[in-house]
Amino acid sequence: MIASKSTQRKIKTIPGIANQHAAPTRTPSLSAPITEVASKLIVDSIDSEIQFDNDIEMTDSEPSLVEAGTKRLTTMHEIEYLKGPAMKRVKNEKPDIKKATKPKYSNKDLPSGCHADDLWCRVLIPTLAEWFGRQSNPFDVPEAETLAALQTIWDKVLGECIPHCIEIGDAIWDVAKQRITEWRSGFAKTALTALDANFDSVDEFKADFKARSVAATAALENEAFLYEHVEDPANRASLSCGHSDDDMKPKGAVALSAAAVERAYKLFATCCIEKKKGKLQLISKANKATGWDSTMDISFSGDIWSDHTYKYFKKMIQKKLHPSSIDKIITGAKQYVKGGSRGSGSSVTTKEDDLSGSDCSLDDILTEPESDYCHLIALNLLLSSI
């Protein structure tokens, strides 16, 4: 066993014949723990000295049998243990490595020419959003499927003039994802604004947020907020078998709307929202009575609302919601549409406008571009929920 933290060893070669008569000795164990690893080990030759630049502490499970100044024989070597000066401790510092940041792309980083005739904003993005609206959960679409859809739309809309192979992480991919995030956020903003307007239209709730909380809590029971006429059981009976064009309907968008409306009601039910100078403001606080932690749940993000969205999609599948019912929801939402900017939750793009300056038919791509007003479906779900 090595008896000190810092040791120098002299190793001498002894002929194998001379060692045949040496009494066998047990080689001391060099087992862990080793508190610090030497930073440099220099070995010039078998006859040279071995030095450790750092302090090394080695312990053995049995008492030390070797003292300084003694010698022992092994099969091939004689090892003499000598006292030596303590070695200096070397301070090891990790290099300062700065984490590389990913560039944030915007419209100006897109390929030149893709904004001609507003094809990017008024055709490609609405069509991609409509495709997302058809998925079972617009919050949780595999990247591979999204990439394939985006590439297909690009090839049809811009591919002839601007051939491009889209890759995950490039400018087209990142900007398109940003627009889809804005599209999803539009559902939440629309639902909250619509519910507030609905409360404002009733004198009982106009200035009384506690009364709004009571009404919202009641609307959340048994998901009553999902039905236009809660007291009429015919709503449930109107659900019938599927249709041939069932897959062409934006069921995912309807499910997203339902989740957005649920969130709006929960914010009012738990008093996590207030109005100052005519504008709604979210309050970050926890409500122990309801178990609703608004510090975590006020955002309309996939981490929180993805499961809720898919739950509503499954309800539509289980109840076999007829395509005409979805058409009715969208038609009811259109009447509330007003002009606005992107991401405001109130803009509409018609098929005729989308096709301006384009030779392709969107029917040849995926569908008609109803996506800009899909987020307004939430309005129709709010008509008679109070």
Image: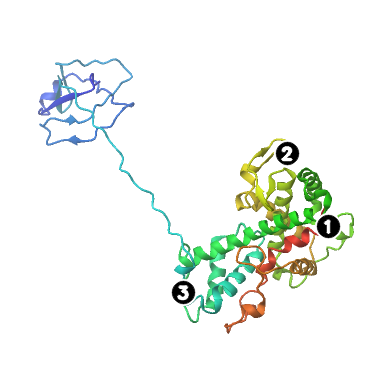
Q: Name the one closer to the observer, 217 or 362.
A: 217
Tell me the residue that label 1 is attached to.
384
Badge nearest the viewer, 3 or 1: 1
Would you identify the image quadrant in which residue 314 lies? bottom right
Few, some or many residues within 10 Å of mark 1 (<14, 14–19, 20+): some
Element type where label 3 sits in the image: loop
From where the camera sits, is residue 243 visible? yes
264, above or below 285, in the image: below
Q: Quick check: 245 left or right of 159?
A: right
Q: Residue furthest front?
A: 277
The amino acid type of the residue labelled 1 equals Ser
Q: Disc 2 and disc 1: Cα gap in Å?
A: 25 Å
Residue ID at (55%, 76%): 118
Q: Name the one closer to the observer, 340 or 354.
A: 340
The amino acid type of the residue labelled 3 equals His
Task: Give how far across and how far down residue 178 sits, in percent.
Answer: 54, 61
Element type where label 1 sits in the image: loop
On residue 164, the disc is 3
Badge nearest the viewer, 2 or 1: 1
4, above or below 372, in the image: above
Q: Quadrant of the N terminus?
A: top left
Q: Name the one closer to the observer, 232 or 23.
A: 232
Task: Give how far across and how far down residue 347 sits, in percent.
Answer: 65, 68
Few, some or many residues within 10 Å of mark 2 (<14, 14–19, 20+): few
Would you identify the image quadrant in which residue 74 lies? top left
Q: Quick check: 287 left or right of 154?
A: right
- Counting residues from the N terminus, which is met first, the one under dot 3 or under dot 1? 3
Tell me the residue that label 2 is attached to.
290
Few, some or many residues within 10 Å of mark 3 (<14, 14–19, 20+): some
Residue ID at (65%, 51%): 305
